[in-house]
């Protein structure tokens, strides 16, 4: 299954979402046949019958599974049951249906939230089971990590070709900027721009600012996923990232500078920081399928800010 996918049919669950659109762009740019993108209004991936219908309609050789219910710390605090159930049930039904349909290759995209709360930094794939995830996002992380176990079990029993990728936190143009569900970068961009526009004297951010995160530009992640689909055949999970961490405080200062916000930044330490540190060892991706991220954080932030400024409600007809 290694090599070009351009003579095979590819289905991308979640292909209309933030990461999915980027993956579809990469596939199209390389000249692959038009990917099949199941929409939730047509195929509820929590329903085994809908999944079977999707696979019958798409007839894919490759399934890239990106569909997920995701959100920031607040959504994880409010809806842990939904995040656990929906992500587990979508993935496990889809993997089983793909096995029964003899799909040639299954690419499952997991989450950095699967790692233990106090993993040694940088996170190594071999440490994935050395502890419990950070409590706030454990239900989501465990649901996604269970799919790795399922793929490995199906490989051993049925010979199913499934691979599992662990991308770090993503950002970029077209991200989710909804204040109720967005992740940290779009949330901070929106907050600082709104504060700038109304000349607010200060912005309050969650936590202490000391936690660190690693961020990967969405187009780089899409490139990694397609490279893995083409070239990787192993059962071991693979980190997808850039291998650099930044504190939330430094991230906030950088975004404030880039959007030209001149007020002060306050920290609400009553709010959770989440996992203390996140930074990946990315050597396996480089060794197994030649992926190295190319977009530096500040450049990616500039592009994301420019997109948001151009696509805020009332300023553009159609976002990317």
Image (cartoon, helix red, strand yellow):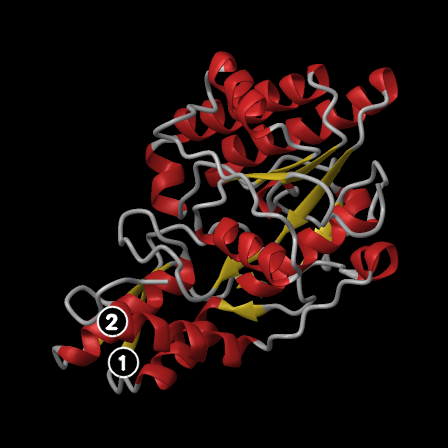
Instruction: Please say whether residue 239 is visible from this viewpoint.
Output: yes
Q: Between disc 1 and disc 2, whose residue precedes?
A: 2
202 on left or right of 275: left
Q: Quadrant of the N terminus?
A: top right
Query: Residue at (36%, 31%) from the top-left corner?
Result: 79
In the rendered image, residue 112, in percent from the top left (x then y), is placed at 61, 47
* Residue at left offset 76%, top offset 60%: 282
Task: Name the quarter where the C terminus is drawn.
Answer: bottom left
Residue nearest the viewer, comparing 204 with 299: 299
Residue 39: image location, x then y, percent: 41, 34
Residue closest to the eye, 192 or 52: 52
| Disc sitting over residue 264 in the figure | 1
For this orientation, the residue located farthest to the left is 198
Give the x, y percent position of residue 157: 85, 15
- In front here: 206 or 70? 70
Mark 1 Cα-neighbour bin, 10 Å: few <14, some 14–19, many ≥20? few
For the question of whether residue 276 can be seen, the reply is no
Q: Identify the residue position indicated by label 2 in the image.
A: 203
Look at 71% across and 31% down and name the residue there.
148
- Residue 143 image position (x, y, % from top left): 57, 28
Q: Say which residue appears at 67% left-offset and 66% top-offset.
A: 242
Label 2 near label 1: C-beta < 8 Å? Answer: yes
In the depicted structure, whether residue 262 falls above or below residue 134: below
In this rendering, is residue 302 above or below 270? below
């Amino acid at each position: 299954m290694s090599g070009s996918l351009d003579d095979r049919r590819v289905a991308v669950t979640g292909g209309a979402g933030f990461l999915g659109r980027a993956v579809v762009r990469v596939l199209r740019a390389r000249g692959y046949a038009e990917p099949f993108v199941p929409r939730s209004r047509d195929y509820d991936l929590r329903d085994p019958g809908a999944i079977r219908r999707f696979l019958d309609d798409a007839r894919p050789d490759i399934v890239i599974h990106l569909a997920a219910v995701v959100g920031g710390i607040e959504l994880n605090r409010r809806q842990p049951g939904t995040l656990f159930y929906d992500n587990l049930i979508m993935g496990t039904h889809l993997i089983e249906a793909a096995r029964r349909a003899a799909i040639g290759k299954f690419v499952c995209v997991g989450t950095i939230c699967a790692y233990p709360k106090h993993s040694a930094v940088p996170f190594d794939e071999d440490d994935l089971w050395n502890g419990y995830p950070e409590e706030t996002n454990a239900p989501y992380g465990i649901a996604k990590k269970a799919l790795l176990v399922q793929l490995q079990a199906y490989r051993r029993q049925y010979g199913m070709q499934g691979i599992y990728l662990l991308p770090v936190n993503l950002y970029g143009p077209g991200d989710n900027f909804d204040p109720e569900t967005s992740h940290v970068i779009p949330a901070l961009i929106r907050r600082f721009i709104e504060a700038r526009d109304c000349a607010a004297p200060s912005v309050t951010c969650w936590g202490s600012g000391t936690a660190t995160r690693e961020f990967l530009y969405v187009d780089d992640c899409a490139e990694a996923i397609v490279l893995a689909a083409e070239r990787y055949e192993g059962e071991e999970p693979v980190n997808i990232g850039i291998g650099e961490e930044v504190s939330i405080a430094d991230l906030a200062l950088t975004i404030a500078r880039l959007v030209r916000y001149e007020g002060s930044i306050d920290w609400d330490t009553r709010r959770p920081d989440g996992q203390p540190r996140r930074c990946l060892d990315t050597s396996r991706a480089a060794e197994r399928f030649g992926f190295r991220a190319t977009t530096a954080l500040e450049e990616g932030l500039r592009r994301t800010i420019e997109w948001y400024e151009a696509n805020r409600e009332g300023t553009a007809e159609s976002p990317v």
